[in-house]
Amino acid sequence: MAGPARRLARPVLFICDIQEKFRGAIHEYGKVVSTTQKMLKASQILNMPVVATTQLRGKLGDLAPELQLDTADGVKTLVNADKSAFSMWVPEVQKVFAEQLGGEKQEVVIVGIESHICVTQSTLDLLREGHKVYVLADGVSSCNPQEVPIALNRLRAEGAVVTTSESFLYECMGDAGIGEFKGIASLVREYNGKTKENLQALCKF
């Protein structure tokens, strides 16, 4: 008899512009990085492809070093695209979806900055293309914290699912009987304290 299937079959993690130069400008930047690190570890357990972008890397620098994307010991991305557009849905990312993900509609989960600009426009484009989009409230922020709830309310109204990292991971699994459950449960325990801090800092508005 076959075991239980995962609830979300095709999740993809989008990491939006978490660049080192924004560290001093973004509200609770470190908490966004922390949630992203948690999601990157989850991506390894759940075999979740990772798409990352930077905004004008030549001027604004590379992604936060803590993320260790595309390093010898870090997570490999499907694509790590630099862009001038505010949306992550740029031709380089579209090509990866068409060629490496079979052109199928995906369940995209987004973390990054800024909530009301790049995260918003990426989400709107993905929804327009028919993808299911989850925006993690404990993984997004902006320079001005007051922008965040306005952006999340708009995205919810547009059809995105606004949720949290822990809720998404358990929805992704759907059943404690799947093989990845122990790994994810262990990760949730590892990040228990940090998750509480991240929620308190980013989800209070």
Image (tube, rainbow, N blue to C red):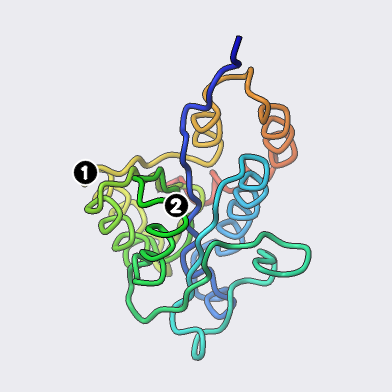
Identified at 69% across, 66% down, the residue is 68
List x then y, in percent, for residue 166: 56, 36
Label 2 to label 1: alpha-carbon separation: 28 Å
Along the horizontal axis of the image, is 176 left or right of 124?
right
Q: Quadrant of the N terminus?
A: top right
In which quadrant of the rendered view does residue 184 lie? top right
Q: Nearer the viewer, residue 143 or 126?
A: 126
Secondary structure at badge 1 equals helix
List x then y, in percent, for residue 110: 44, 53
Q: Which of 160 and 91 is in front in this view?
A: 91
In this view, the residue farthest toward the bottom is 59
Identified at 77% across, 68% down, the residue is 72
Q: How crowded is mark 1: few (under 14 residues within 10 Å), some or many (20 or more)?
A: few
Q: Which of marks 2 and 1 is nearer the N terminus?
A: 2
Secondary structure at badge 2 equals loop
Q: Nearer the viewer, residue 162 or 89?
A: 89
- Residue 154 vertical position relative to residue 117 in the rendered view, above or below: above
Tell me the number on the disc at residue 157. 1
List x then y, in percent, for residue 43: 61, 47
Q: Nearer the viewer, residue 13 or 155?
A: 13
List x then y, in percent, for residue 173: 55, 29
In this view, the residue farthest toward the right is 73
Tell me the number on the disc at residue 101. 2
Identified at 59% across, 51% down, the residue is 35
The amino acid at mark 1 is Ala
